[in-house]
Image (cartoon, rainbow, N blue to C red):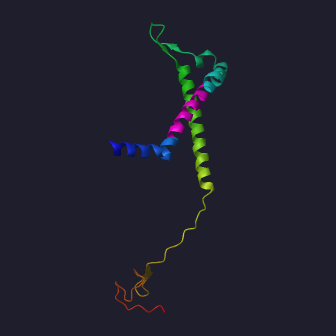
Amino acid sequence: MKKFLQEFKAFISKGNVLDLAVGVIIGGAFSGIVTSLTDNIIQPIINLIGASEVAGSIQIGSNPENLLNYGAFISAIINFIIMAFVIFCIVKAVNKAMTIGKKEEPEVEAEPTTKICPFCKSEIPIDAVKCCHCTSDLPSEE
């Protein structure tokens, strides 16, 4: 049991878990702001443009409480699009911030490990003295 608690403590101490917890809390708070923006500002503008058809609901069947509330659905779609756009912008900014301090090192070409036989034009190991394809003695490269 003691080992289990130590492993759990190490897991919780990792930065990723704490960052995720903070992200979820901030996301929840931001979701309330976006919902308020959609319900209190964008939805009235849509209602003004499209009249009551956009914000309304349709009664299904004879029961007056059985409503298809498509205005709330449109509001939820707008809410989702705003949240997705903001998250996209945040991720893009964080990725850019992560690359600012890093220097890009130029790739160093590796030493060649093969060469071409001057007689049969086959690819052979660079330290070969005899071609394995045509069995020619290779000239020394000194």
Task: Give the x, y percent position of residue 128.
Answer: 39, 86
| Residue 1 to residue 131: above or below | above
Residue 33 magenta-highlighted: yes
Figure quadrant of the N terminus: top left
* Residue drawn at 44 percent across, 10 percent down: 61
Residue range in magenta is: 20-35
Q: Residue placed farthest to the left in the image?
A: 1
Task: Give the x, y percent position of residue 51.
Answer: 64, 17
Residue 100 figure quarter: bottom right
| Residue 2 to residue 78: above or below | below
Residue 109 magenta-highlighted: no
Q: In the image, is 118 to the left or to the right of 109?
A: left
Task: Give the x, y percent position of residue 121.
Answer: 42, 83
* Residue drawn at 47 percent across, 47 percent down: 14
Q: In the image, is 139 to the left or to the right of 33?
A: left
Nearer to us in this view, 10 or 82? 10
Q: Residue placed farthest to the front in the image?
A: 2
Residue 53 figure quarter: top right
Task: Give the x, y percent position of residue 78.
Answer: 58, 29
The overriding secondary structure of the stretch rendered in magenta is helix
| Residue 48 to residue 83: above or below | above
* Residue drawn at 65 percent across, 20 percent down: 44
Residue 113 figure quarter: bottom left
